[in-house]
Image (tube, rainbow, N blue to C red):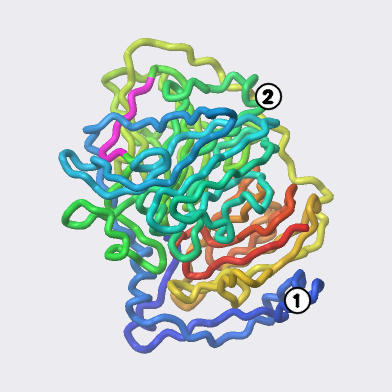
Amino acid sequence: MKSSFWISSLLLSTIIIGGCSAGNTQSENESEKNQAMDHTKMEPEQKMGDMEEMEGHMSHENPAALNDSTEENELAIPPLLEPVDGSYPITAQQGTTEIFEGIQTDTYGYNGSFLGPVIRIKRGDAVTFKTRNELTEPTTFHWHGLDIPGKGDGGPHQVVEPGETKDVKFTVNQEASTLWFHPHQKGITAEQVYKGLAGLIYVEDENSQKLGLPDNYGVNDFPLVFQDRQFDDKNQLNFKAMHNDDGTIGNTLLVNGTLNPKLTVGAEKVRLRLLNGSNARNYTFKLNTGDSFQQIATDGGFLNEPLEMSEITLTPGERAEIIVDFSKQNSNSDIALVNEEDTILLPFKVRDEQTNSAELPESLNDYKVTDEERSLPVAKRLELFGMGMHVTINGKQFDMNRIDFTQKQGETEIWEVYNKPDPMGGMVHPFHIHGTQFKIVTIDGEDPPEILQGWKDTVAIEPGQTVKLAVKFNNKGTYMYHCHLLEHEDNGMMGQVEVN
């Protein structure tokens, strides 16, 4: 995590962290619910955490190093989920998985023992997700990034009890994108994801199908779910033993649930759909050869044109689609995705035969932040603050019975989100809003970098940074907004907006 801390403060005294409190206390009065906070009026003096909590925070300064992939195992490719009688059956279940050779690890999964399938849907389709819970504990099914009515969003209010089945019906109404789904059960989201509940959603539309991008699933179009895990001495996912209130970080990398993976590709342009599915770790992806690649999409859709880059950073919950050109590589090539520490995350094995490697289209989308959106006043101010069990938004922790904001369906508002530092420097908070794709208008008053000039549902906010977002909800209902460090979410760094 990118932050700094005061060693001397830890050695000499108990840290007194400057707290945050609402500039105006919210009430049931409609106008007060929507009243913007004034950051200049935040009250200080919130005493936070004990030494154990501080150490948990400090572990993110120098997170545990990941293992290099030894290339022992071909990457598992999740199955595509096909509809049955017009609906998509999605069952949360538990079982065992052979992650380490000869050893069975207790895991959770969707339609299997570990992780989940890829659900492919198309804009305009009427869709039914038939969700079932075969776990021994309650769960929810949250469709991260999906434009969906609040009653089907799968937040902590839409609990599916063990043995229960619930249908989620909606019409797909957003552009082509790579989304994902995972639980959002109050207080145990981090543990359920850690044990394996996560899967991807591909949204297609007419534009995506005519662009000529690599789209042969599992051949030149690959889903890549990156997750770090810590296993105990019995090679089990003992979440409670490994738990960190500031986000559980592991030393073992799994890609699509595969330990020590490699990916065999053709000598062509290949599309990689990257998901940071970790609880808390950030990844900076690059090629060990120093070659560039092209980003074509953000969380919620295509960029306007392919963007050449040498690395890309994703915080938990964020996605990106990139194109890597293997046409000049061969079976002797030593090429791999690595992180900022040059740890080998995913080695590639290139088949010698030459395949089609057509040029990418110059234009992919017509995304823009309009002059009208730029001129809108700030309607909602949010202040992210704290660490461990003491994380807050606008000085408050999540309350299922409290609506923090309201917004009109179909109306665009500007949300200003500030990440308030503390004497330890603070933490990067990946800020996520349910049920919408938003536009980043400015970051600290400046236009966002090109890689963020596309539809987003999760944005990384550095300590001391302020972002302005243009937010519109196309559906009614109650939606969460929160930090996507899963332990922070569980600890209460979350609020609710009611759209009516």
Vertical relation: 94 (above or below) 388: above
Vertical relation: 385 (above or below) 322: below
Q: Residue at x 63, y 26 (%)?
A: 208
Q: CA distance from mark 1 to mark 2?
A: 44 Å
Looking at the rendering, in which quadrant would you find the N terminus?
bottom left
Vertical relation: 221 (above or below) 103: above
Given residues 484 and 66, the one toward you in this image is 484
Residue annotated with mark 1: 28
Which amino acid does the dot numbered 1 rest on? Glu
Q: Position of residue 196 (x, y in %)?
A: 37, 48
Q: Specify the quadrant of the image occupied by residue 168.
A: top right
Q: Position of residue 336 (x, y in %)?
A: 33, 33
Look at the numbered disc 2 and give the secondary structure of its residue.
Answer: helix
Q: Residue at x 24, y 47 (%)?
A: 105
Which residues are drawn in magenta?
258-265
Look at the numbered disc 1 and give the secondary structure of its residue.
Answer: loop
Would residue 83 be visible to someone looking at this image?
A: yes
Q: Specify the quadrant of the image occupied by residue 48.
A: bottom left
| Neighbour tally class for label 1: few under 14, some 14-19, many 20 plus, Cα within 10 Å | few
Q: Verify whether residue 212 appears in magenta.
A: no
Mark in the foreground, 1 or 2: 1
Q: Position of residue 360 (x, y in %)?
A: 57, 22
Vertical relation: 435 (above or below) 99: below
Residue 206: numbered disc? 2
Which amino acid does the dot numbered 2 rest on? Glu
Question: Is residue 250 toward the left or the right of residue 392 in the image?
Answer: left
Q: Main secondary structure of the magenta part?
A: strand
